[in-house]
Image (tube, rainbow, N blue to C red):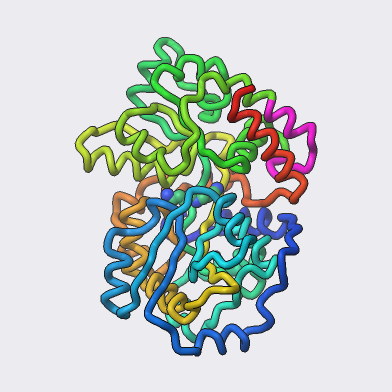
């Protein structure tokens, strides 16, 4: 893949997204488009409340939107789909835009947690990659609820110099996942610091993938096997911290992370900016990373849906999206933005992956509710280490 989504990528997304299971029944979907449009047309106070992932926007994105529209934005951040999902099902989040990953969004749409988009207000929709929109229909039939934000994959990030020094005579493993899941390596890397994402689903999906088991399994035995494997490396893990990985890597506080490729590239960028010059690399495991796509959606009970549409349309401007990619080093799904993305980022093969690496990515999916409960129980035990 060069700058837009390749056929391989699209096929991969299709396989994963159409086979995900669901099981939410929190409430019913917004009645119909007319209802949403009526709300969106009502006069609104000039306020917009956004809930997005941390480190996922350019410094002037909000400021420019406020200047252009006179709308005042309150911008809060989160670090896991679990946290966002808990707020959504409790209702009355107070947010007008939230950014779930697409696999979680599928359940949330089916649970009636989002309102339909008014496409007449989204005049920049034409800038989106048609292939990816088509694939998103696996989660969101007719592209009625979601607007893509950015995409990346779960993988291993390293501080190259520190890892080589800690491994000593032991060569780098063929399989990058060994660095976080194999005690032969983790026991040596413990000295320079290993950090994991603090999200049960991400950790168990990667562990199951490493063990060559179905990543979105319903089997208790599979989760038990992943737990047993994880417990062997538990004493070597220094931290569980999703949002803090960028600073920890950039500051040299840890040398290995299980996390998001985009954040690893951002950590390298930050270490150059803060002159600590750490050689941080997002590895693309030979057995593949786990793809994710984060998407904007409007909660069913949002108070400012019209302003939310204005913001979505603003983000879909090619230069606005490209500026975000240039800041946070995540690939975007806006075809028209490509020419404005910095060459260094466009040519970075851990951000815009090769077709060969894309073909190895594990498609996005989602566990059933029972499986989620099981893996969360195992995760709590794993994290506490007893
Ligand atoms: N700093 C931005 C992080 C975005 C991560 N998205 C979550 C993916 C879940 N697998």
Q: Is residue 234 left or right of residue 246?
A: right
The residue closer to the viewer here, 365 or 30, is 30
Examine the rendered structure and indicate whether residue 87 appears above or below residue 360. Answer: below
Does the magenta segment cover residue 332? Answer: no
Q: Residue at x 55, y 85 (%)?
A: 39
Q: Is residue 253 left or right of residue 366?
A: left
Examine the rendered structure and indicate whether residue 223 appears above or below residue 87. Answer: above
Place residue 221 in its image quadrant.
top right
Q: Residue at x 42, y 47 (%)?
A: 262
Q: Residue 274 location in percent, x, y?
A: 22, 39
In this view, the residue farthest toward the top is: 169
Q: Is residue 229 left or right of residue 348?
A: right
Q: Residue at x 62, y 19 (%)?
A: 232
Q: Is residue 126 visible?
A: no
Q: Residue at x 44, y 82 (%)?
A: 123
Place residue 281 in its image quadrant.
top left
Q: Residue 184 location in percent, x, y?
A: 54, 15
Q: Residue 147 location in percent, x, y?
A: 51, 69
Q: Is residue 158 visible?
A: yes
Q: Residue 321 location in percent, x, y?
A: 37, 65
The residue closer to the viewer here, 156 or 191, is 191
User: Residues in magenta?
Assistant: 214-227
Place residue 256 in its image quadrant.
top left
Does the magenta segment cover residue 217? Answer: yes
């Amino acid at each position: 893949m060069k700058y837009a989504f390749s056929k391989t990528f699209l096929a991969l997304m299709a396989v994963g997204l159409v086979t995900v299971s669901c099981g939410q029944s929190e409430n019913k979907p917004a009645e119909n488009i007319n209802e949403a449009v009526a709300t969106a047309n009502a006069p609104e106070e000039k306020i917009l409340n956004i809930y997005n992932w941390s480190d996922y926007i350019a410094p002037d994105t909000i400021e420019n939107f406020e200047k252009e529209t006179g709308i005042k934005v309150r911008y809060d951040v989160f670090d896991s789909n679990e946290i966002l999902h808990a707020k959504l099902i409790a209702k009355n989040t107070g947010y007008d835009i939230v950014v779930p990953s697409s696999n979680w969004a599928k359940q949330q749409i089916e649970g009636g947690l989002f309102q339909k988009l008014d496409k007449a207000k989204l005049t920049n929709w034409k800038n989106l990659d048609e292939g990816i929109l088509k694939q998103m229909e696996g989660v969101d039939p007719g592209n009625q609820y979601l607007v893509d934000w950015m995409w990346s994959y779960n993988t291993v990030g390293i501080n190259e110099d520190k890892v080589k020094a800690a491994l000593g005579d032991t060569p780098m493993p063929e399989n990058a996942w060994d660095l976080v899941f194999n005690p032969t390596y983790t026991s040596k890397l413990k000295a320079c610091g290993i950090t994991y994402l603090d999200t049960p689903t991400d950790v168990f999906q990667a562990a199951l993938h490493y063990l060559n088991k179905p990543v979105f399994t319903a089997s208790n035995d599979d989760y038990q096997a992943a737990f047993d494997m994880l417990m062997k490396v538990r004493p070597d893990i220094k931290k569980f911290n999703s949002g803090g990985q960028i600073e920890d890597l950039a500051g040299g506080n840890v040398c290995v992370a299980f996390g998001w490729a985009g954040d690893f590239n951002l950590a390298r960028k930050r270490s150059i900016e803060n002159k600590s010059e750490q050689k941080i690399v997002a590895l693309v495991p030979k057995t593949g990373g786990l793809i994710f796509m984060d998407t904007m959606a409007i909660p069913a009970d949002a108070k400012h849906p019209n302003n939310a549409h204005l913001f979505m349309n603003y983000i879909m401007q090619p230069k606005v999206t490209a500026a975000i990619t240039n800041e946070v080093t995540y690939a975007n799904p806006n075809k028209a933005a490509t020419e404005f993305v910095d060459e260094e980022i466009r040519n970075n093969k851990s951000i815009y992956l090769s077709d060969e690496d894309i073909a190895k990515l594990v498609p996005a999916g989602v566990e059933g509710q029972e499986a989620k409960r099981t893996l969360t129980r195992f995760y709590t035990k794993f994290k506490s280490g007893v």
